[in-house]
Image (tube, grey):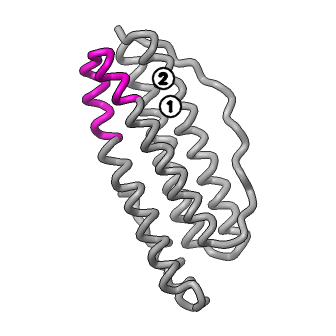
Amino acid sequence: MIGKAMQDTINEQINKELFSSYLYLSMAAYFEDKSLPGFAHWMRMQEAEEREHAMKFYDFLLERGGKVMLKAIDAPKTEWTSTMEVMQEVAEHEAKVTASIYALYELALKEKDYPAQMMLQWFITEQVEEEKNAAEIIASLKMIEAHETAVLQLDHRLGKRGGD
């Protein structure tokens, strides 16, 4: 049986992961509107991953005899001024998610919740990848910022992302 504090915090994390999914879907729509289907595809892949993360937490709660308590999801932002602004927001958002996962892990340590510690190890590793991916795209955008053709080439590359 999972403790109440861990259950409540995981329920909050489910909400955060679903908000992330919503935010990335909004970013995908932004890129579709800007005729950047590769960036839109990349964001849709991100959206699906975030939904999957929410379900990992959801299933974990159920497996541990906890109660899932879904809350309202805030509306995400819908407008940005540039591709760079979107990607910088992705990087900032992933840093917030990482901090939230770390706080969950600290709670699991405090509560001596070993199953939660094991499950959260996967998320810690995942967040390293998420932050790295955003940083790499930002670095590429900085190199090509003034060259529209290069942005289209990066868009094409992002459109080839598979279901990794």
Where residue 102 appears, x then y in whole percent?
38, 36
Q: Residue at x 63, y 50 (%)?
A: 23
Q: Is residue 1 a member of the stretch shown in magenta? A: no
Most prominent secondary structure in the magenta stretch? helix
Where residue 103 appears, x then y in whole percent?
41, 31
On the image, which quarter does residue 114 sit in?
top left
Quarter the N terminus occupies: top left
Q: What residue sits right under mark 1 in the picture?
A: 13
Mark 1 falls on what kind of element?
A: helix
On the image, which quarter does residue 146 sit in?
bottom right
Q: What residue sits right under mark 2 in the picture?
A: 9
Residue range highlighted in magenta: 104-123
Instruction: Give how far apart the Cα atoms at labels 1 and 2 are.
Output: 6 Å
On the image, which quarter does residue 148 sit in?
bottom right
What is the crowding at mark 2: few (fewer than 14 residues within 10 Å), some, or many (at least 20)?
some
Viewer-closest of 39 and 78: 78
What is the crowding at mark 1: few (fewer than 14 residues within 10 Å), some, or many (at least 20)?
many
Q: Residue at x 46, y 63 (%)?
A: 134
Q: Amino acid at mark 2?
A: Thr
Where residue 109 appears, x then y in whole percent?
29, 23
Q: Which mark is residue 134?
A: none
Q: Amino acid at mark 1?
A: Gln
Where residue 99 appears, x then y in whole percent?
44, 41
Q: Is residue 116 a member of the stretch shown in magenta? A: yes
Mark 2 falls on what kind of element?
A: helix
Q: In this image, 158 relative to 105: left or right?
A: right
